[in-house]
Amino acid sequence: MRRFFVQFGQFSGAFLALLFLLEIPIQWNYKTQNADMADWQKLEGINADIVFIGNSRTWHSLDADTASQKTGHNIYALAQDGWQVRLLNQKLKTYLKQNRQPEFFFIQADPAFLGTRTNWYSKSNFLKYLFLDREGLQDLMKAYEGYHWWDWSIPTIRYAGLPGRYIIDATGSNMGIHRRHGTLPESAGVQERLPAIPMDVWKCSVRSTAWIDSLKGQCPSSKIILWHPPISQALSEKRDITAITSYSIEHNVPLFDLGKASLADSMFKDNTHVNKFGSIWTTDTVVAFIQELNALQQP
Amino acid sequence: MLFNSPDFLLFLPIVFGLYWFVTQRNLKGQNLLLLVASYVFYGWWDWRFLGLIALSTIVDFLVGIRIEEAPDKARKKRWLWVSLAVNLGILGYFKYANFFIENWISAWQSLGVTMHASTLQVILPVGISFYTFQTLSYSIDIYRGNLKATRDPVAFGAFVSFFPQLVAGPIERATNLLPQITAPRKFTYEQGRDGMRLILWGMFKKVVVADSCAPYVDMCFDNPEAFSGSTLILGAILFSFQIYGDFSGYSDIAIGTAKLFGFELMTNFKFPYFSRDIAEFWRRWHISLSTWFRDYLYIPLGGSRVSKPKAIRNVFVIFLVSGFWHGANWTFIAWGGIHALLFIPLFLRGTNRKNTTSIVAQGKWLPSPRELLQMGLTFTVVTIAWVFFRADTLPQALQFIHTIPSTQSQTFPTTKLYAIIPAVAYMALTEFKHRKSDTIRLSNFTAGFLCAIIVGFQLEINDSPESFIYFQF
């Protein structure tokens, strides 16, 4: 027995050492090379006047840098692709610990963000952001299909089932995210008319509006605005946001609805995400809306 | 719980530690631990179906004692029927009910009678065909007087549910496994080392060979008309290696795991693709099932010691039932039928036992041209039969075969073939080197190399880990 254990210990020790060795470039790249990633983790000192919270639809639609320049306000997009409200709700808590409450707080109000389906995103969506987790997001991740306890417990093993990904992260390939003020969406390329999020109907349930209360509750002194980024015409035919409009009326919260704008297909990357042209239009529309809000705010 | 999951990576050392360090002086404690661990292992998949294993265990435990105590053959037989009815009833309901309902409706509809019947919403419990056959063999062996009924319910429970081979075999005989369970076990270095090496080799076959072949094979079978003949031929060949890597890999891990607990399970595969005819293939492929059918079906039917027509009937019966055992689908029956048709000519010529004592390239480094031709031919017909095994329906299998010569271009999609082909070649060469023995012996260097390859494939080649194909049977 002793001989068996000594030999097995040596062998498995060498094996674990190999896994740790493979982990080194990953850790190093995430912590030092990828400034965008690090920026996303650094929420302190932003103190934005206006915060937009949402998922990739907010992230793609709003060029927060441009909007900041045009309005003269500090606008921040607390948005993340591959995430839904369950995770952003947690991220907002961290943001508010390090920053003052915004004057205006825009909440993305659509089924893509407020829905909590667990099968929309795979591990690859979350991997890069959770790696330097500081907010206990791993616990929230457990609800999602594809999450395994070993992803964060055994070094390197988290890359199993994501062919090619280890090489990308180990070699420090840039993720191309401009995190500080959102992102400049990709340029208009070939129109991929594929639904980015597999949805038969674009419908919000009444239950999902409870998340709005949760987000709102964290910013009691902010003026809340619900906003619905644009969707393609094909998807708008399946749209049913009665629960959102009812919420807006019942709670006297304005709804800034760009989902009903009939934008041409040439402004979309796919059914749920605008491309560069769609982003320019959305950002300009948002800027105009904010300027209108400012006008209302002035005594 | 999958052998290739980190859950098992945690489960195995815990059970191993408790087994050898906490309960090692107490045989009953060890057996109880095995029983509990086996139920946890199975319940990890779906705890609701533990009741089926428990039912099968209780029935056969009691029936075994009744058969032994019955004063005459007639009463023994009656009790045996109870075991057969319960086990085959469970199997029939969970595995074959929908098949029979659907075919019953189709048969009437073909006669112009419209029937309205809905199929049952039955989930197929993992490994049901394996453990029901294992318990059945226990009752039959007692009935035949080959085995004494055990009075130890814990030992019997551990025998039925022994986790290393519970869900995909080898289908152990009570005559082999039960005496090992009721006797004290001792850990030996050699057994532990061999066990670990077999586990590693099984993981290599599963993760590196089978799982990397799977996407290519799925691509070909999902949409055969979209690909060239050469792509489909390669798809069929890769399926031959996928199913071998998957199933024999599972068996290796099962046998290796059992060794860690001091048990010796029967060999389930003896390098079947080095067979020189179809009869030799069947002596080397899924040995625990083919010998089960031989002992409990073929020989009771009269085997080959009856008139020629009856003997041919018996061959057909055993192959068709073997096919049907794999699943409730005509494709499996067709697969069994093809093997029967391939076997019958050897049987009629009396050459089906020609290659029983020798191995390929006996005493030589390489096979002779004649042996190569024989091996190639056997592999080809086995691969064609696998098309029926893999296809979802008979028309799909026929379409797959029909598409091969009908397309002109000879191209191969580049999907990871750079990794798949060397992996398959390495497996084939290693097994060819070890063809004289029943098992693979690996040096520490090779073991380390295999570990690195497994990690590399998991990280960079394979998509999500695949379940074992034979779980569905």
Image (cartoon, rainbow, N blue to C red):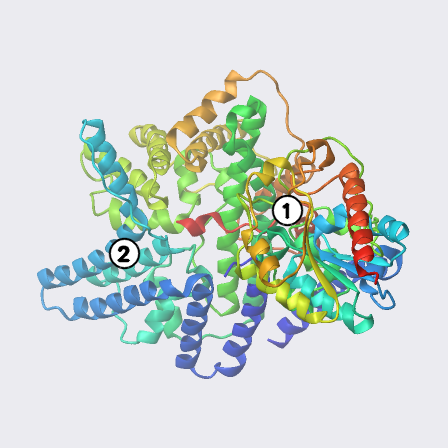
Q: Position of residue B27 (x, y in %)?
A: 41, 80
Q: Position of residue B220 (x, y in %)?
A: 54, 31
In-image side of A95 versus B214 (left or right):
right
Q: Determine which residue is flagged by label 1.
A: B462
Q: Specify whether residue A230 is in view.
A: yes
Query: Which numbered disc, 2 or 1, marks the residue that appears first in the sequence?
Result: 2
Numbered circles on residues, count:
2
Binning the other alpha carbons within 10 Å of mark 2 as few (below 14), some (14 to 19) or many (20 upward) gives some
Q: Position of residue B292 (x, y in %)?
A: 32, 51
Rendered residue at 60%/50% (across/down)? B464
Rendered residue at 27%/50% (across/down)? B92
Please identify the quadrant where the C terminus of chain A is shown.
bottom right
Binning the other alpha carbons within 10 Å of mark 1 as few (below 14), some (14 to 19) or many (20 upward) gives many
Q: Residue furthest front?
A: A299
Give the structural element (helix, strand or loop) at label 2: helix
Q: Position of residue A93 (x, y in %)?
A: 73, 70
Front-lying residue, A79 or B414: A79
In-image side of A227 versus B129 (left or right):
right
Q: Quadrant of residue A249?
A: bottom right
Q: Specify whether residue A142 is in view.
A: no
Please identify the quadrant where the N terminus of chain A is shown.
bottom right
The amino acid pointed to by label 2 is Ile
Q: Quadrant of residue B461?
A: top right
Q: Mark 2 belongs to which subunit?
A: B
In-image side of A206 versus B171 (left or right):
right
Q: CA distance from mark 2 to mark 1?
A: 36 Å
* Rendered image: mark on residue B90: 2
Rendered residue at 71%/37% (across/down)? A268
